Amino acid sequence: MFASVCLLLLQAQSTALAEHNIPNIFHPLSTPARTEFGVSMLVFAITGAIFVVVAALLIYTMVRFRHRPGKDDEAEPPQVYGSNRIEAAWTVIPILIVFVLAGVSARVVWGVEDASPPKSTLHVTVIGHQYWWEVNYPYYGVVTANEIHVPVARGGQHATYLELTSNDVIHSLWVPELGGKTDLIPKRENHMWLDPSEPGVYRGNCTEFCGVQHANMLLEVVAQEPADFERWVAAQQKSHPVVAPVSDGQKRFMMCAGCHAIKGTHFMGRLGPDLTHIASRRSIGSGVLPNTPENLRAWISNAQDSKPGCLMPAMKLTSKNLDDLTAFMETLN
Ligand code: CUA
């Protein structure tokens, strides 16, 4: 009865989680995440058993030896000294437990790290910035930000291999459904790989404190059917050639071009996210706002309102200029 209630609660919870796109460490959907989930369950079982044994002994002692009226409170319990058997038991058993936990964890960590990616692996470079993620697909010539599109992996095909580095301080990438945390360190390249088994949007976060907006350094892995992924790549590869007449918004973009690039134009700033296909993205500001025209307009007007401390300054534009710029950027899909 209790078990079935728990199961029902868990099921209700997992659907709610799926709807709200909240990361769930109990729902691994990629080989590294599944392997790591297995170790967590083993650790949980061993430590859970220790907890039950210790708690049971504690409760037994508290009940069995509680104060009773009429008993002599001054009397000492029997004193045990120098029992080699007891001392050996409480030394050897914890050492064995620590060895088992350390050995299994080390084997899994090395197993996940050393697994060589299959031939058809997609290579993606992810660069951490304060406070957003640059995502490069060198083979396809695609640059985007804050969302990593990958194909769903089936039958050992289409795994995605991430090369991770940082532009400034140390960040760490964690998408709980797909794998463990890996640091992004300046002047160093770390690796991780994932092979999502189901299409979906998996939310991740920076998990190494990197400054005031660390908590708002979110990212999403969008796992798509291979054909959908190919379509996404083809759309992202398109550039935006400048065609006359140039709109007011596009002229206004000149003030953004010190930091932002649009492929196919002379706007080639590299400090901020590449905006070639900004309108196709799901969020603004690395996950702080859903990508709607109103939010984009508010973000351009003063990004510090929604993400205080981010590097994007308030643009101090008139209402007309904001409208023009937003309208232009909505064409970048
Ligand atoms: Cu980037 Cu915390």
Image (cartoon, rainbow, N blue to C red):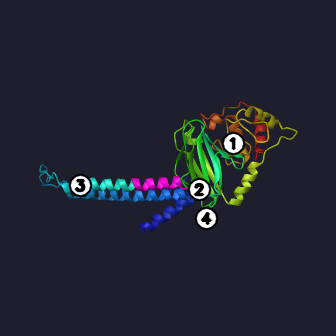
Q: Residue furthest bottom?
A: 1
For label 1, the residue is 295
Q: Which residues are magenta?
A: 102-115
Which residue bears the numbered disc 2? Answer: 117
User: How many C-alpha atoms fall within 10 Å of the one at disc 4: few (<14), some, or many (≥20)?
Assistant: few
Between the C-alphas of marks 1 and 4, the distance is 41 Å
Q: Earlier in the sequence, mark 3 or mark 1?
A: 3
Q: Report how far apart the C-alphas of labels 1 and 2 lie in the structure.
A: 40 Å
Q: CA distance from mark 2 to mark 4?
A: 13 Å
1 or 2: tag closer to the N-terminus: 2
Quadrant containing the N terminus is: bottom left
Which residue is under mark 4? 155
Task: Judge the density around disc 3: few (<14), some (14-19), many (≥20) Cα neighbours within 10 Å.
Answer: few
Q: Disc 2 and disc 3: Cα gap in Å?
A: 46 Å
Q: Residue at x 36, y 54 (%)?
A: 99
The residues tagged by marks 3 and 1 sit, at their Cα atoms, a distance apart of 66 Å
For marks 3 and 4, the one nearer the N-term is 3
Of 101 and 77, nearer the camera is 101
Q: Are marks 3 and 1 in contact (CB under 8 Å)?
A: no
SS state under label 1: helix
Q: Is residue 150 visible?
A: yes
Residue occupying the point 47% across, 56% down: 108
Disc number lying in front (1 or 4): 4
Local SS, label 3: helix
- The numbered disc on residue 88 is 3
